[in-house]
Image (tube, rainbow, N blue to C red):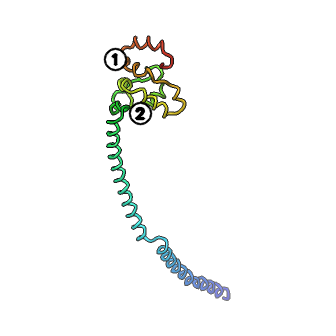
């Protein structure tokens, strides 16, 4: 009988922990609420979000105005520049520019990047512009001389393949 009383006493020991657990739970709720007020205020997040949205709209408006300004500036530059005779790039005709002596695949890529896709466009491009494209590409390309490229491209455009082949046999690296 003494053993039975002892085991009843152990059950009462567990029930004495319940108020402590309840108190810790309440304390956790209060602490969480305080921390959310200090660090996680939704009012501040909303104001930051609205500020971000207004700045994004302002940035988009600036970009739109910048494009208009750039296009207007480009057209006035084209009207005054002797070098800007070539019309706007039309990439609907993509000729193999490597048929021209002195132009390899990498230089063709440079010309394409600058808006020159066809033999006709290449034949109408001033030598100064071609040299500038090469110079801008780096020292590995400055050794190329585009002196005869326009003439060769015109022969390609006109289909004068035999004449082009004979002339290219006399050329060395496009010069």
Q: Is residue 63 above or below residue 18?
A: above
- Residue 149 - label: none
* Label tally: 2
| Residue visible at 37% across and 17% down in the picture | 155
x then y, percent, for residue 154:
37, 19
Snapshot quadrant of residue 150: top left
| Residue visible at 60% across and 86% down in the picture | 12
Could you tell me if the residues under marks 1 and 2 are in contact, i.e. CB atoms within 8 Å?
A: no
Which residue is identified by label 2? 114
Q: CA distance from mark 1 to mark 2?
A: 23 Å
Left or right placement of residue 169 versus residue 91 in this view: right
User: Label 2's element?
Assistant: loop
Crowd rating for badge 2 (residues with CA inside 10 Å; few <14, some 14–19, many 20+): few
- Sequence-wise, the earlier of marks 1 and 2 is 2
Q: Is residue 22 above or below residue 160?
A: below
Snapshot quadrant of residue 128: top left
x then y, percent, for residue 143:
53, 26
| Residue visible at 48% across and 28% down in the picture | 106
User: Label 1's element?
Assistant: helix
Left or right placement of residue 85 versus residue 11 in this view: left
Which residue is more in the foreground, 107 or 173?
A: 173
Crowd rating for badge 1 (residues with CA inside 10 Å; few <14, some 14–19, many 20+): few
Which residue is identified by label 1? 158
x then y, percent, for residue 61:
34, 53
Snapshot quadrant of residue 10: bottom right
x then y, percent, for residue 59:
38, 55
Q: Is residue 9 above or below residue 42?
A: below
| Residue visible at 51% across and 80% down in the picture | 26
Residue furthest out toward the right: 2
Which image quarter is the N terminus in?
bottom right
Which residue is more in the foreground, 59 or 68?
A: 68
């Amino acid at each position: 009988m003494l053993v039975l009383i002892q085991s009843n006493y152990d059950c009462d020991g567990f029930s004495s922990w319940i108020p402590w657990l309840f108190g810790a739970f309440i304390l956790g709720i209060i602490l969480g609420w305080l921390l959310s007020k200090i660090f996680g205020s939704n009012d501040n997040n909303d104001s930051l979000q609205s500020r971000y949205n207004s700045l994004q709209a302002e940035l988009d408006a600036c970009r739109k105005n910048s494009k208009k300004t750039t296009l207007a500036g480009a057209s006035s530059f084209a009207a005054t520049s002797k070098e800007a005779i070539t019309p706007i790039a039309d990439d609907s005709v993509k000729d193999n520019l490597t048929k021209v002596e002195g132009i390899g695949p990498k230089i063709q890529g440079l010309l394409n990047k600058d808006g020159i896709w066809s033999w006709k466009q290449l034949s109408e491009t001033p030598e100064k512009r071609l040299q500038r494209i090469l110079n801008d590409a780096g020292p590995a390309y400055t050794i190329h001389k585009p002196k005869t490229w326009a003439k060769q491209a015109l022969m390609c455009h006109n289909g004068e393949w035999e004449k082009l082949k004979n002339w290219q046999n006399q050329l060395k690296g496009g010069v």
